[in-house]
Amino acid sequence: MTKLMIYGAAGYTGRMVSTNAKAHELDFVIAGRPQDEDRLAALAADLGVDFRLFAVDDQGGAGTALEDIGVLLNCAGPFMRTAEPLMRACIANGVHYLDIAAELDSYRLAEALDAEAVAAGVMLLPGSGGSVAMLGSLASHAAKRVAAPRKLSIALHVAGGFSRGSAVSASENLTTETLHRVAGTLVARSPEEVRAFDFGNGPATSFPVTLPDLITIWRATGIPDIETFVHVTEGAFPEGDLAAMPDGPTLEQREAHRYHAAVEVVGEDGTVVRSVLDTVNGYTFTTIAAAEAARRVLGGEVRAGFQTPAGLFGDGFAETIADTSIVDL
């Protein structure tokens, strides 16, 4: 089966992913919750594709909707509500699962379901677009610059505002613990341990945060000590009534705010290397990368079980997306 389903296509990011899937000339349908029927119908008419309706917790409805589908791309957040039922539906129906989640629990879930997915011959690829694809490529690239990498510190520079859906997901998924990976194990750390990263314009104070890259980078590289940080440009994170936010950044806003990431890797012999990634706005990157990942999976780039974008597609994946480059310092 070589047909793609984009679930959550009525949302800001889902609409952009669907438009990119159309540009890729993929064979796809869009889908979402019954209450989104009017928006899905309008989008389906614009794109010239079919649409399907089912609630994520309706396993029977999901099974019927997935009968002729080979790959499901989940764009419906918060993923704390949608990832598990859709992963389980995919495993039950022999469909490869992709999403764009930036929530740690989605990746813990993929780890927990790994054996079931392998047994079913199904791939679980959370983070097929977005920061996980960006940071995974950057981390794997830098890790190859030292003979025996032992510690990796990586930071994402977020700029240009959030979509309403992302803001809601972020507000509902505030992690109570700040984690890092030490000797291969996730442990708590102080959120006050800030450090500076140079994203290309001088040192910028970055705060330790719990990112899913603590799982994906470790899984792709095996580096035992990993810490993740974020530098958020003032005004990028929304305040006030999230329901009153606009759908998402406009094209002009996205074009005015590029994303950056910086990484430092320390080798067993004390060698230190640094690399920086420069790319388009995060929403632009995510929606192009997710559609490209789906295209490649539909084309047969598949390994059963829990996979990461960098592990599956290689550390050059991010640089195939839009205007993305990695520079070694």
Image (cartoon, grey):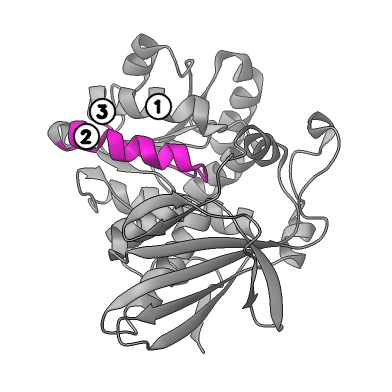
Question: Which of the image's four quarters has the N terminus?
Answer: top left
Q: Is residue 167 magenta?
A: no
Q: Give the mark toward the camera: 1 or 3.
A: 1
Dot 3 crowding, Cα within 10 Å, few <14, some 14–19, many 20+: many
Residues shaded magenta: 95-118
Mark 1 — residue? 84
As rendered, which of 174 and 85 lies closer to the eye?
174
Determine which residue is flagged by label 3: 91
Q: Which mark is residue 117?
A: 2
Kind of residue sitting beneath label 2: Ala
Q: Quadrant of residue 12?
A: top right
Residue depicted at 23% across the width and 49% down the height: 302
The answer to whether the residues at label 2 and label 3 have Cβ atoms under 8 Å apart is yes
What residue is shown at x 16% (from left), y 31% (from top)? 120
Secondary structure of residue under mark 1: helix
Q: Position of residue 201 (x, y in %)?
A: 71, 83
